[in-house]
Image (tube, rainbow, N blue to C red):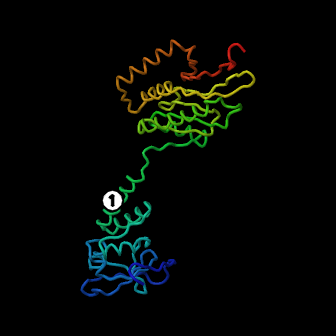
Amino acid sequence: MSGDTCLTTTLCPAVGPKPKTCSFKVGSLGNKYVRLNVGGSLYYTTVQVLTRHDTMLKAMFSGRMEVLTDKEGWILIDRCGKHFGTILNYLRDDTIALPKHRQEIKELMAEAKYYLIQGLVDMCQAALQDKKDLYEPVCNIPIITSPKEEERLIESSMKPVVKLLYNRSNNKYSYTSNSDDNLLKNIELFDKLSLRFNGRVLFIKDVIGDEICCWSFYGQGRKLAEVCCTSIVYATEKKQTKVEFPEARIYEETLNVLLYETPRVPDNSLLEATSRSRSQASHSEDDDGFELRDRVRRIHVKRYSTYDDRQLGH
């Protein structure tokens, strides 16, 4: 077997005499091969390779530390042998091709730290940082899979929460002509807001709820406001479902939840804008469909309306 290959065996409970201890000196063995049993993986290499760098392995094989051997003469190292071949390659060449997956790099770095191979530790840390910068998403949006998961996310979040529920299949009636476009506009606005306020607000999506399109706003674990974007339209001969896009109202409520950031550091301009908006809304509750129940603002955009698309004179 070469130094970069190994034979993996299954270790059985030790029977018979205990492993013996011995010490090595570089001058006594030189380039001769030694046999290593690293957690059941068997390797051949030379003492010269093991003592090239100032590591724990050099201390073991230069006489500064005693090593254990079994009755067949294999030197026992009580570590996982999965990455030991890679470590030997680094000791030989001062460089290696690192694994592709982050988990394997972390495993290799743990072994390098144990053997005190600082150069390999630095390589692993640099690779992990590069992969983090390369693959770390700018914005993570959780998608709700159950009411219990939604409750857990909102209660555990230290940030304000904005939730968009959209489920086109909940419709009982046909949609009006602009409903699909307005539904897409709501989704696009959600994506834009999640990027703009990333890090300050937790944005979550719900695709299994009972509404067709509805925004919910939470602060410090409780619901503050709700903007429902659907309404039932009574046409001449049939009912239809209409989806609205109340962009200004959604922006307003998103700014309102920023007042519930932890720690709360609202600026004066934000306080002034939101307080003015709420003051104006309180004077026009009937006109805007504004309801106050249990201190939750529920805004229904044209919840029930009628229209007759017949031309005048017919």
From this view, report whether residue 28 is shown above or below residue 55. below
Q: Quadrant of the N terminus?
A: bottom left
Between residues 255 and 83, which one lies in front from this camera angle? Answer: 255
Percent coordinates x, y for residue 142 in the rendering: 52, 43
Number of marks in the image? 1
Residue 88, by quadrant, is bottom left
From the viewer's perspective, is 128 left or right of 242? Answer: left
Disc 1 residue type? Answer: Ala
Residue 295 in the image, given as x and y percentages of width and height: 54, 21
Q: Position of residue 122 (x, y in %)?
A: 30, 62
- Name the residue rendered at 43%, 60% in the picture: 102
Name the residue at 34% across, 86% down: 33
Q: Residue at x 37, y 52 (%)?
A: 133
| Residue at the front extreme, as displayed | 313
List the residue tagged with mark 1. 126
Left or right? Give the position of 69 relative to 191. left
Give the residue furthest to the right: 237
The spot of residue 182 in percent (x, y) is 57, 31
Q: Is residue 304 left or right of residue 50?
A: right
Q: Crowdedness of circle 1 by 10 Å Cα count: few (<14), some, many (20+)?
A: few
Q: Is residue 82 left or right of residue 172?
A: left
Element under disc 1 = helix
| Nearer-the-camera pick, 306 or 2 | 306
Quarter of the image where one finds residue 294? top right
Quarter holding the C terminus is top right
> Which residue occupies the foreground of this view, 177 or 232?
177
224 shown above or below 69: above
Check the image and report above or below for 231 versus 17. above
